Amino acid sequence: MNKYFPEIKNKFGFGCMRFPMIDENTIDKEQVCKMVDLFIESGFNYFDTAHAYHNGMSETTLKECLTSRYPRDKYLLVNKLTNEFFEKEEDIVPFFEKQLEWCGVDYFDFYLMHAQTATYYKKFKACRAYEIAQELKAAGKIKHVGLSFHDSPEVLEEILSEHPEVEVVQIQFNYVDYNNESIQAKKCYDICRKYGKKIAVMEPVKGGQLVNMPAEAMDVFKELGDASAASYALRFAAGFEDIYMVLSGMSNMDQMVDNLNTFKDFKPLDEKEMAAIDKICNILAEKKAVGCTACEYCITQNQCPMEIPIPRLFANLNLKKVHNDGNSHWYYGTYTANKGKASDCIECGGCEAACPQHLPIIDLLKEVAEIFEN
């Protein structure tokens, strides 16, 4: 049982942002049902979604694969209010009611102000989003109110100082971003603790980057034993005080089984394992890989006028730079066959404003074009 929230059965949660897919527009619901079944049968009950995930299909998939198949007391459901789905105060409650309908529930156990940044927070304040969430809580439609965060520690402190009623904060937290000057995971973690907030972790394996690492980095883990690279990343995140939940967006049953095994008999990293983590961080820093987590905010919260598939192009750049994959040029041609090329960028800056990782996307696209188009 979770020591921070008794209703949570374990410290590991099912992130519903990266469901298994049959094709680009079709979730493999048969496999999702099997994953949900194993997750619940193994003693876990925390599911995290948002309307932005899978273009709205994450919520309806949960209705079909979870909420219509299990009693309400068998699971906890997290949902979020996302910037792109409301324009004024009057839009929020109708959208919230639709989310309940899409998910097939009467209330959410946790409801988060989604992807808070300095810019988005201004809109949420103007629309009284935090106050409306409290009203919905008072009405019994939300059990716990929180926020997910993608900005500087200073912005986080501003929000928490102005909204002491917030119970939980979801932050990006992994061993690569712990001391990263852009993400500043440690500083954000410290701000949460300063204000007495319980913490949920997203991107513990950094969008899969801490699983698909260069051979020399993977060799460091192999020297420790047979455990997976993902297990070390998850244990790193879960070992910190006041972290009540670590989320993983699992795309197949193998990932589910490995992660469940990590948390069934959870143990924090020991000194030898932490030393290995430090060594891997140094190796990855030398590779200078692009820190894109494939959240797709650059194309879902900002409509690229040139339809450039930015996350895919950055994943391909990492494939080339970190792994020196000879197929990366072929993939680039595939990704841009019916979409914009990196060189098509008109430098409007919308993608950079939406990026939770604060990446210099315009400059990186120039690098992509130089490598793959010349």
Image (cartoon, helix red, strand yellow):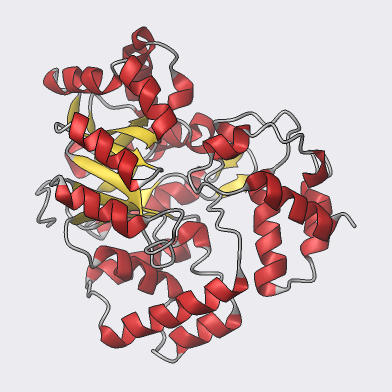
* Residue farthest to the right, as pictured: 374
Q: Is residue 322 left or right of residue 31?
A: right
Please give the name of the residue rendered at 53% of the width and 53% of the height, measured from the top-left corner: 293
Q: Position of residue 86 (x, y in %)?
A: 43, 17
Q: Is residue 182 left or right of residue 246?
A: right
Q: Nearer the viewer, residue 365 or 265?
A: 365
The answer to whether residue 120 of the structure is visible from this angle is yes
Please give the name of the residue rendered at 17% of the width and 52% of the height, measured from the top-left corner: 193
Please give the name of the residue rendered at 38% of the width and 17% of the height, measured from the top-left corner: 95
Please give the name of the residue rendered at 65% of the width and 57% of the height, measured from the top-left corner: 315
Q: Which quadrant, please, contains the C terminus?
A: bottom right
Q: Position of residue 77 (x, y in %)?
A: 28, 38
Residue 348 vs 255, above or below: the answer is above
Q: Is residue 151 left or right of residue 285?
A: left
Residue 102 vs 224, above or below: the answer is above
Residue 164 vs 331, above or below: the answer is above
Q: Position of residue 311 (x, y in %)?
A: 63, 48
The answer to whether residue 101 of the structure is visible from this angle is no
Q: Position of residue 9 (x, y in %)?
A: 17, 54
